[in-house]
Image (cartoon, helix red, strand yellow):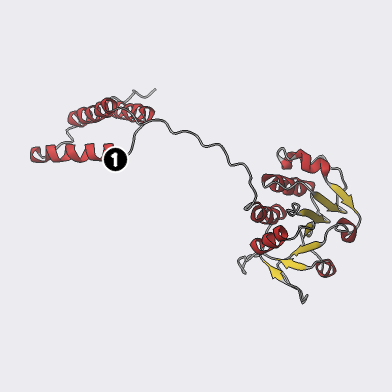
Amino acid sequence: MSAPPPTIVLVRPQLAENIGKAARAMLNFGLTDLRLVTPRDGWPNPDAFPAAAGADCVIEGARIFDSVGAAIADCAHVYATTVRRRGVTKPVLDPEQAAAAIRAAPERSAVLFGPERAGLETDEVAIARAILTVPINPEFGSLNLAQAVILVAYEWSKCERLAQPPAREADPPAPQAELDGLVAHLEAALEQARYFFPPARVRATKRTLRSVLTKPSWTSNEIRTLRGVVEALAHPRARR
């Protein structure tokens, strides 16, 4: 039996926009179970939808609870996110370790995130089975709510079979005749500008230019673009 995706619990979130951003982060990585504990500005809140950027199903499915205990009542494994251990003796995991533990447990897991300004209170951390913390710059340990959610969601998703963006087929290389035309066009423009000097170096210089131009696999569109550049340099448009 595979483990269910983790539940994301936002405890006393302050701004609806941050709830929306957290929902967006969740859905990016396949998470949809969002629970809110006494959001400051009430719920539902229309300000969450623009920030969710299309993750409306997460926003619309969010459930409201009046306490952390009620929000996690059906969860067997609870992780409290915090950058401060506050004297609580519990296992301390990073997001990768927590994701592995969540995947290994067949029961439902929940991850608690505290309010934006101060994070979870000590008593709320004490409810959890383990502390989840991110190795972070000790001189600047400030993550916003959506950043914290996306780190956890991403680590959980790494072993899931999420769809990858479709690969775009590359344009085929240009035929040799087009490349030769580019080289001839460039040489003619350089001849006009008296670039090739001294005469004894003309052949070697032209060979070097051809070598540079034949290294990449230019596409037809790229060659047309480069020839347009050469044409503009050779015959600049008059200023208006």
Residue occupying image coordinates x 52% and y 37%: 167
Residue 134 position, x and y percent, is: 65, 64
Residue positioned most to the front: 1
Q: Determine which quarter of the picture holds residue 28.
A: top right
Residue occupying image coordinates x 75% and y 49%: 18
Q: Is any part of residue 76 visible from this angle?
A: yes
Please, is residue 64 above or below residue 201 in the view? Answer: below
Residue type indicated by callout 1: Lys
Q: Is residue 41 left or right of residue 175?
A: right
Front in this rendered view, residue 41 or 167 = 167
Residue 96 position, x and y percent, is: 64, 61
Residue positioned most to the left: 200
Please, is residue 209 above or below residue 16 in the view? Answer: above
Q: Is residue 224 left or right of residue 4?
A: left
Residue 220 position, x and y percent, is: 36, 27
Q: Secondary structure at mark 1?
A: loop
* Residue carrying label 1: 215
Residue 109 position, x and y percent, is: 78, 58
Q: How many marks?
A: 1
Please, is residue 90 above or below residue 204 in the view? Answer: below
Please, is residue 63 above or below residue 172 in the view? Answer: below
Q: Is any part of residue 48 visible from this angle?
A: no
Q: Which image quadrant: the N terminus? A: bottom right
Q: Is residue 115 left or right of residue 161?
A: right
